Amino acid sequence: MALDPEDLNAVFSSMAEGLVVIDNQQRVEALNQAGGVFLRIAPKQAMGMLIGDLLKLYHIEHNEQILWPVERLMKLDITRIHIWDHIYCENKIGKLFPITMMATPLLTAHAVSGAVILFRDATDEARADQAKSDFVAVASHQLQTPLTAIKLFAEMLDQDANELSEGQRREYLQLLRSSTERMIKLVNEMLNVSRLEAGAFRIQPEPTDLVVFIKGILKELGSLAKERSCILTFSEPSESLGALLIDTALLSQVLFNLVENAMRYSTKNTRHVTIKLEKKTARGEYAIHIEDNGIGISSGDRKRIFTKFFRADSARKIKSNGSGLGLYVVKMIVEAWGGTISFTSQTGVGTVFSVTIPAGGMEPRKGIKQLIQT
């Protein structure tokens, strides 16, 4: 069907992307509503402006303004869409924001009479690109330490083999093994982050007695608790909870991480960690609390505690080589099964992390991957 001018104007105004039409003199002939919102200018006010004054473009890396390639724009192949990205635009209130821009010559009566420019805010893409760059940079830095240690101990075993005592060889081999295990743990954590962020992992709940399950977790952690002079206590509910649909692999990962952290980050001679299970009455959900008498989390670190690669200053003083991925992964797992995670903390007194599970248990979810136990 043919569209009349009124219909075309409706289409023009309804577009989510900014659209500008310019003439051969580089002056604006039309600007749609979305473009006006992006640029903080009324479309009528933009009429007749030079395109370089309306759309001020910048190379952010070089901190320099881009001159509009008007002559080249008019000579572009009309059968192709020409795209500019990794550029920034300055709106009328002086704010720079990343845009992706597409342009093509405007052909009327078999002659180029101007150009049509389509643009959109690319802030989300820019943030995603920056997050990927940060992830690679931090991951490379984290991997460098264990890899350097592996190389060093391997060279010592190779070059000084005849001069080393049996005890020294055992020591270097143990250090080599520890560095290798640390690197494997870090790689597995990064793989889990990738799977969690992509939403590509499975949730496979099965009927589980939470009391029996948590007792099993604490039994597995018994030797580590003894090694760290930690007293583990389980406070179970007075009433029977029955079976609940739980993905035991995911819950294990969450509890191991939280309980190990609780045991690790303490400077006291005798460490106490209490796991409490309760059924909340408000919404019928289940809550697991992990309470310690450790170093606590400072007020300045609390807002960032679940951020990827973040480690609190107090934690770094006790254990310098953590990845900063543990709590980030825990939060994503808990939220994926429909639960919540929160904490209260007092510096020098201790911290309580609380994890909830929906009243009906975890919902199954299809996926191509399982998370790796770390």
Image (cartoon, grey):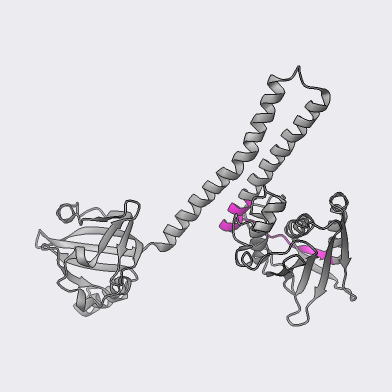
Look at the image and give the residue range highlighted in magenta: 192-210
Give the x, y percent position of residue 73: 18, 55
Residue depicted at x 75% and y 30%: 172
Give the x, y percent position of residue 26: 14, 63
Q: Residue furthest right?
A: 238
Identify which residue, 22 or 87, lies in the foreground.
Answer: 87
* Above/below status of 231 relative to 34: above
Q: Quadrant of residue 179?
A: top right
Residue depicted at x 14% and y 67%: 27
Give the x, y percent position of residue 355: 73, 68
Identify which residue, 367 or 310, lies in the foreground.
Answer: 310
Give the x, y percent position of residue 119: 30, 63
Residue 4 appears in the picture as rendered: no
Identify which residue, 11 or 310, lies in the foreground.
Answer: 310
* Above/below status of 153 relative to 188: above
Residue 120 placement, left or right of 312: left
Residue 305 placement, left or right of 175: left
Residue 112 placement, left or right of 13: left
Identify which residue, 60 or 234, lies in the foreground.
Answer: 60
Q: Residue furthest top?
A: 162
Q: Quadrant of residue 162?
A: top right
Residue 193 shown in magenta: yes
* Screen quadrant of the N terminus: bottom left
Residue 294 shown in magenta: no
Residue depicted at x 19% and y 67%: 21
Residue 41 appears in the picture as rendered: yes
Count the labels in the image.
0
